[in-house]
Image: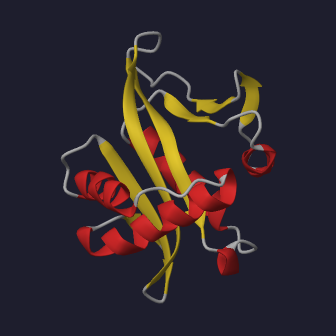
Amino acid sequence: MIRQGAKEDLQTLVEGNLQMAQETEGLALDRETVTRGVAAVLEGEAPGRYFVFEVEGRVQGQLMVTFEWSDWRARQVWWIQSVYVWPEARRGGVYRQLYQAVQAAARADGAGGIRLYVDERNTRAQEVYARLGMNGEHYRVFEAMFEEPAS
């Protein structure tokens, strides 16, 4: 099941962010800083949203978006800031399901599309996102822009 992140998910989401940074970029992030950042989103103090994939009450994947105004589209565009799936759940289509859920939520909110910046050196992440159908041709920004809404 995919649902919005809640305050009760704070420590799980922090742990996912710490593990993601270590696995994908070799970074050891400061737990206290990450905790403040995740809490700000969950408490509505920062413009973002967490989506979590959970099975039997256990979070197995997470995806966080922020929102940016696009003057080219005169609408918001959602930026995927982080996405992490726990190792034991990686062969179950969790990445795809999270991405599809975020696409549906963005469309329902009237967003102009979804973007994700991936460093050119992070080939593992690029491969994952390419399999999801995201296009990496534009400065390594993987994006899915939506059609204009019907007037």
Residue 102 spot, x, y in % from top left: 50, 50
Instruction: Tell whether 79 sits left or right of 3.
Output: right
- Residue at 73% across / 49% down in the picture? 125
Q: Nearer the viewer, residue 77 or 36?
A: 36
Taking the view exactly as shown, the residue that stands out farthest to the bottom is 56
Instruction: Tell whether 145 sits left or right of 92.
Output: left
Residue 77 spot, x, y in % from top left: 45, 29
Residue 47 spot, x, y in % from top left: 28, 40
- Residue at 50% across / 21% down in the picture? 148
| Tally of numbered discs | 0
Residue 99 to residue 15: above or below: above
Within the image, what quadrant is residue 91 found in?
Answer: bottom right
Residue 1 spot, x, y in % from top left: 49, 74
Q: Nearer the viewer, residue 15 or 105?
A: 15
Residue 87 to residue 44: above or below: below
Residue 93 visible from this viewpoint? yes
**What's the coloring here?**
secondary structure
Instruction: Tell whether 126 sits left or right of 86.
Output: right
Q: Quadrant of the C terminus?
A: top left
Q: Nearer the viewer, residue 75 or 54?
A: 54
Residue 98 visible from this viewpoint? no
Within the image, what quadrant is residue 133 found in?
Answer: top right
- Residue at 27% across / 56% down in the picture? 36
- Residue at 71% across / 71% down in the picture? 90
Residue 90 to residue 64: above or below: below
Taking the view exactly as shown, the residue that stands out farthest to the top is 72
